[in-house]
Amino acid sequence: MSTPYLFRTMVDVPLWDPLIALHDESVFLGSCFAENVGHRFLDYALPVTVNPLGVLYNPASIHATIRQALHPDALPLFQADGEWRCWLTDTLLGGSSEQECREVVEGAFLLLGEALRKARYVFLTLGTNVCYRLREENLLVNNCHKQPGKLFQEVRLSLRECVSALEETILLLQETNPQARVVLTVSPYRYAKYGFHQSQISKSTLLLAEDELCQRFPSKVSYFPAYEIVLDELRDYRFYTSDMLHPSPQAVDYIWQRMVENMMDSELKQYLSEYEPIRRDLSHRPVHPGSPQALHFQQCTKERLEALRKKYGIT
C-alpha cells in the first residue's frame, strides 16, 4: 500500500522540559501575537500577566520595559493633546494630569515587576528589529503616541544589538528570579509598511538572535516555533485576517493546540479539557438575559466553575 499524502509539512515542536504545570505563573510580553496567545491563558483562568504596559515590538523596548519594572527609574512623561502619557507605554495608559499619569504608569510597572519576580515562564515575542528614538533626547520610545514623525529617528537594530538587548534582559531576569524560564518566539505578523523584503530581513535578524541566546543559555532559554508553524505548516491565506498580515483566530487556535500538546503536563491538559465547556458557557450570550431560564443557566455555570476551581485549587 502506498504512503498516504499529508498535504502539509509538520513543524517539529520538541517536548518541553520541564512541562508547564497548572499553577505555574507566566508572563507574556511583546507584539500583538503575545497578547493573542497570552489571552488564551486568561481564557482558561490560568495565572498569567499579559503586556500590562501595552504592546512591545523589538528587543530594545522589551529590555527597557523589564529593566524599568525591576529597577524603577524616572519615568519619561510628556504632555500632548491635553493628555499626559509615558514614552514607555502605549496610548491606553495615561491621565489628564501629570500626577494621574504617573500613578497609572507606576502601577502598571509595579504589576509587571511583581509578576516577573514570581513567574515560572516568561514568554517574549519579538515582532521587528525596528525601534524609534526621540531625536532631541536620544531616548528609546516604546510607542510614538501618534506624534509627528519628525520627532523620531527610525533605527534598525543590528544582530549584535538584538543579541545584546536579549542577553541583558535574560541576565536581569535570572538575577531577580533564578527559577524563571524564558521562552522566545518571533511573531508571524508581517510588517508591510517596511516592505516585505525588509520585513523578512527583520524576522531573519530576530531568528538569528534568538538562536544565539538559546545556545548561550540552554538550560534557561527555549524557542517556540510559532513563526514557522504559521509560515511553513499552515501556509495559506485563509489563516490570516482580512488584512492578509495578521494571523487569524483559527491560526492562533492551532498554535495554542501545539503549545498544549508539547508544553503542558498531564494535569494541566486535564484541567483545560474540563474547563473548555465552562469557558464556552461563560461566553454564551442569552437572547433574553433577565429571563428565569437565563438566570438559571448562569447560576449553574457559576456552580460548575466554583466546583472546578475547588477541585484544582484555583483561586
Image (cartoon, helix red, strand yellow):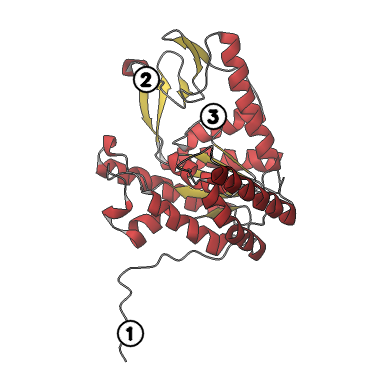
Q: Say if 155 sits above or below 195 in the image.
A: above
Q: Which element is circle 3 on?
A: loop
Q: Which mark is residue 254?
A: none
* In front of the other: 190 or 59: 190
Residue 235, position as x, y percentages in the image: 30, 58
Q: Residue at x 56, y 15 (%)?
A: 101
**Are circles 1 and 3 on residues that touch, CB within 8 Å?**
no
Q: Which element is circle 1 on?
A: loop
Q: How far apart, in angstroms, are the residues tagged by discs 2 and 1?
A: 55 Å
* In front of the other: 42 or 235: 42
The quadrant the C terminus occupies is top right
- From the image, tell me which residue sits under label 3: 53
Amino acid type indicated by mark 3: Leu
- From the image, tell me which residue sits under label 1: 3
Residue 172, position as x, y percentages in the image: 64, 38
On the rendered structure, is 109 left or right of 230? Answer: right
Q: Which element is circle 2 on?
A: loop
